[in-house]
């Protein structure tokens, strides 16, 4: 299987650690992930809320540039926009015509799009990943958090069970961690309202953090830059506002998988997390104190 | 829980964007079971609840909908559609309402439309978003200077921001996409 990687804008800034750890894990597993040359923004929430054609043409410009290769995506929001654009362009001749007019070239909606989680599950395989684990995450209780955009709408995303997805749980189990059973796997964190309607994010993300803590999780594992940002960077705001303490690190799945594969924490961007994960990781014996990242 | 809208409704033929959804059965099959509202993370404080949106679209109460707060508080999480026994396309309807409320200049919320405009202007200029420029422009536009200000040094130290914007992709092609979008919005 031959891929081109579409990082998306977040992976160049707030989610740089997601880009770093995705590339490190791909290299460790022998997956070739060359970046799509000259990629541009998928339009994200702003496009679909503002203009129906931009919401299709901005992703389509990238999909058309992939020249038949499978587009690998790490950001759940980009993944959603790329797949929804493909669905509409392939299924509605009028949309296809309007996109062709905007791009100056026909695009039929057929470029395959896969999330990195799907590549790990379907193309690499959990057993092959488990074989490469050098540093099992023994004793680490993780809450696998999927959020909205990977799983909904289920008829188009076809990613996993929409109410009880399991791919991150299985991956974490392969990495030697304990994936806990909890109720907020696919609840919304407030997503793109982090800047515009912060109070909604503080309320919804608090519910996710509370559910994880009540289920006995040591940390949360995400696959979306928006979810990770809200659960990690907004955690101190939530604690302050409600006079409570969570102290729950919010990792990208690639960071924990990378640790299990024996990669150095610097190559995984662990120092970028706002809720410091090092006390937890050293307490569990996953990282040695002397190997802690200088900050 | 009956209707929350107590004013007399002003009814009219739904605009074309909503008519298309109604014709495709994407909205017409709703039987008001209210499962959408039950699962919605922001329905508790909504001025118009998800199941009411569907009914009001069917009735042609477009003015009520376009001026509602809820269309800007919806997080686009998609739980309503995923759990709907009739596969009613509420997220698509809410997107159509957001776009129409912008076109008619009746959007009840200033922050989200301002953020979206700045976001898209950045994409048009640079090809990608640039979060630092985006945040700065948004704060200037909405005069929210103090919010999150104390966090900037930490975010810079943690490498959360790319400092300098760069140009990406084919600029002429991008300008064409944005130009066509504007032309098609203006065409009936």
Image (tube, coloured by chain):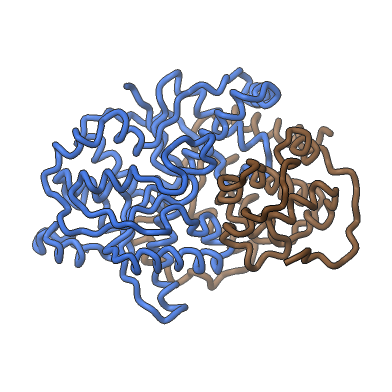
Q: Quadrant of the C terminus of chain A?
A: bottom left
- Say above or below: B139 vs A31: below
x and y percent of residue A287 in the render?
Answer: 13, 58
Looking at the image, residue B150 sits to the left or right of residue B29; the answer is left
- Say above or below: B96 vs A105: below
> How many discs mark residues in the rendered view?
0
Q: Which of the 4 quarters of the picture holds residue A97? A: top right
Q: What hue represents chain B?
A: brown
Looking at the image, residue B136 sits to the left or right of residue B10; the answer is left
Taking the spot 20% from the left edge, 46% from the top edge, the residue there is A175
Between A162 and A288, the residue placed more toward the observer is A162
Taking the spot 57% from the left edge, 20% from the top edge, the residue there is A107
Spot the residue most to the bottom: A243
Looking at the image, residue B148 sits to the left or right of residue B52; the answer is left
Q: Which of the 4 quarters of the picture holds residue A87? A: top right
Between B137 and A141, the residue placed more toward the observer is A141
x and y percent of residue B162 in the render?
Answer: 41, 51
Taking the spot 72% from the left edge, 52% from the top edge, the residue there is B32
x and y percent of residue A223 in the render?
Answer: 38, 47
Q: Quadrant of the N terminus of chain A?
A: top left
Query: Which chain wears blue?
Result: A
Residue B109, can we see it? no
x and y percent of residue B59 in the render?
Answer: 84, 49
Taking the spot 57% from the left edge, 32% from the top edge, the residue there is A85
């Amino acid at each position: 299987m031959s891929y081109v990687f579409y990082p998306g804008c977040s992976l160049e800034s707030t989610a740089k650690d997601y880009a770093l750890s995705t590339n490190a894990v791909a290299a460790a597993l022998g997956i070739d992930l060359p970046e799509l040359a000259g990629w541009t923004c998928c339009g994200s929430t702003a496009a679909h809320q503002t203009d129906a054609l931009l919401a299709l043409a901005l992703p389509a410009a990238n999909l058309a540039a992939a020249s038949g290769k499978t587009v690998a995506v790490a950001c759940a929001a980009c993944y959603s926009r790329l797949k929804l654009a493909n669905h509409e362009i392939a299924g509605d001749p009028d949309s296809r015509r309007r996109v062709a007019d905007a791009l100056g070239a026909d695009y039929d909606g057929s470029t395959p799009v896969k999330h990195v989680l799907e590549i790990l599950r379907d193309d690499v395989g959990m057993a092959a990943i488990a074989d490469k684990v050098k540093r099992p995450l023994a004793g680490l209780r993780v809450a696998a958090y999927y959020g909205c955009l990977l799983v909904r709408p289920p008829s188009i995303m076809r990613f996993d069970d929409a109410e009880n997805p399991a791919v991150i749980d299985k991956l974490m189990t392969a990495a030697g961690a304990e994936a806990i059973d909890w109720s907020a796997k696919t609840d919304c964190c407030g997503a793109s309202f982090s800047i515009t309607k912060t109070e909604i994010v503080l309320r919804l993300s608090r519910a996710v953090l509370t559910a994880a803590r009540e289920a006995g999780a040591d940390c949360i594992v995400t696959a979306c830059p928006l979810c990770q940002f809200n659960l990690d960077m907004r955690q101190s705001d939530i604690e302050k506002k409600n006079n409570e303490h969570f102290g729950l690190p919010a990792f990208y799945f690639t960071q924990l998988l990378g640790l299990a594969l024996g990669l150095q924490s610097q190559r995984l961007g662990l120092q970028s997390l706002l809720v410091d994960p090092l006390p937890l990781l050293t307490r569990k014996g996953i990282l040695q104190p002397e190997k802690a990242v200088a900050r | 829980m009956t209707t929350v809208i107590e004013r007399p409704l002003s009814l009219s033929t739904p605009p074309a964007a909503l008519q298309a959804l109604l014709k495709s059965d994407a909205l017409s099959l709703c039987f008001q079971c209210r499962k959408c509202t039950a699962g919605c993370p922001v329905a508790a404080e909504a001025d118009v609840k998800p199941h009411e949106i569907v009914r009001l679209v069917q009735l042609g109460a477009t003015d009520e909908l376009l001026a509602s707060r809820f269309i800007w508080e919806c997080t686009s999480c998609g739980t309503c559609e995923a759990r709907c026994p009739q596969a009613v396309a509420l997220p698509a309807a809410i997107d159509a309402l957001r776009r129409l409320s912008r076109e008619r200049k009746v959007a009840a919320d200033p922050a989200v439309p301002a953020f979206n405009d700045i976001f898209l202007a950045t994409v048009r200029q640079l090809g990608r978003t640039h979060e630092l420029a985006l945040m700065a422009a948004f704060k200037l536009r909405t005069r929210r200077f103090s919010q999150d200000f104390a966090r900037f040094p930490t975010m810079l130290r943690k490498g959360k921001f790319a400092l300098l914007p760069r140009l990406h992709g084919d600029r002429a092609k991008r300008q064409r996409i944005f130009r066509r979008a504007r032309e098609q919005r203006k065409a009936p």
